[in-house]
Image: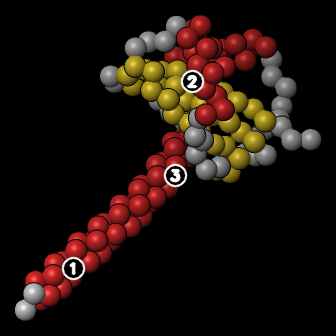
Amino acid sequence: MDKVTGELKVFFEEPFWIGLFERVENGKLSAAKVTFGAEPKDYEVYDFILKHYYVLRFSPAVAVSEKETKKNPKRMQREVKKQLQDTGIGTKSQQALKLQQEQFKTERRHRSREQKEAEEERMFDLKQQKRKEKHRGH
């Protein structure tokens, strides 16, 4: 049976509030980053999750090791409190987001290169057409 876990961290990263969605599926972690701007209220975050979760663009999956042990409820509360006080992104999440950013960068470079080549070819054809029109009358 496949186990899927999800986690949302909302933290302040100068000058905006950031939401970090982490999803662990089949032992692989993928992350998505959302900029909220002003500090979101709990109901605003909940509403965002309900309306926009399936539109989020998650990063490519990164392998992660997961321990399956039962924890004491008090210990879990302490860890949640500690996570709420922590600021920043976990290293696996950072890796996943960086990988996604690099993919977008290569796609953008590829698209811009194709556009530039198409524009150069169009200008060349236009120049050739003008040359032909100049010689047509003589």
Which labelled disc corresponds to residue 9?
2
* Depth check, front residue: 40 or 88: 40
Q: Amino acid at mark 2?
A: Lys
Quadrant containing the N terminus is: top right
Q: Are marks 3 and 2 in contact (CB under 8 Å)?
A: no
**N-terminal-most mark, 3 or 2:** 2
Q: Are marks 1 and 2 in contact (CB under 8 Å)?
A: no
Q: Amino acid at mark 3?
A: Leu
Which labelled disc corresponds to residue 45?
none
Dot 1 lies on which element?
Answer: helix
Quarter of image, res 113: bottom left
Q: Residue furthest bottom?
A: 138
Which residue lies at the image location 52% right of the left edge and 21% below the top edge? 10
Measure how far apart labels 3 and 1 are at the Cα level. 45 Å
Quarter of image, res 49: top right
**Residue bearing the label numbered 1:** 129
* Depth check, front residue: 83 or 136: 136
Dot 3 lies on which element?
Answer: helix
**Residue bearing the label numbered 3:** 99
Residue 116 left/right relative to 31 = left
Residue 67 at what x, y percent from top left? 78, 38
Q: Amino acid at mark 1?
A: Gln
Q: Measured along the vertical axis of the image, is residue 63 above or below residue 129?
A: above
* Depth check, front residue: 122 or 75: 122
Q: Residues within 10 Å of mark 2 (few under 14, many from 20)?
A: some
Which residue lies at the image location 58% right of the left edge and 45% below the top edge? 59
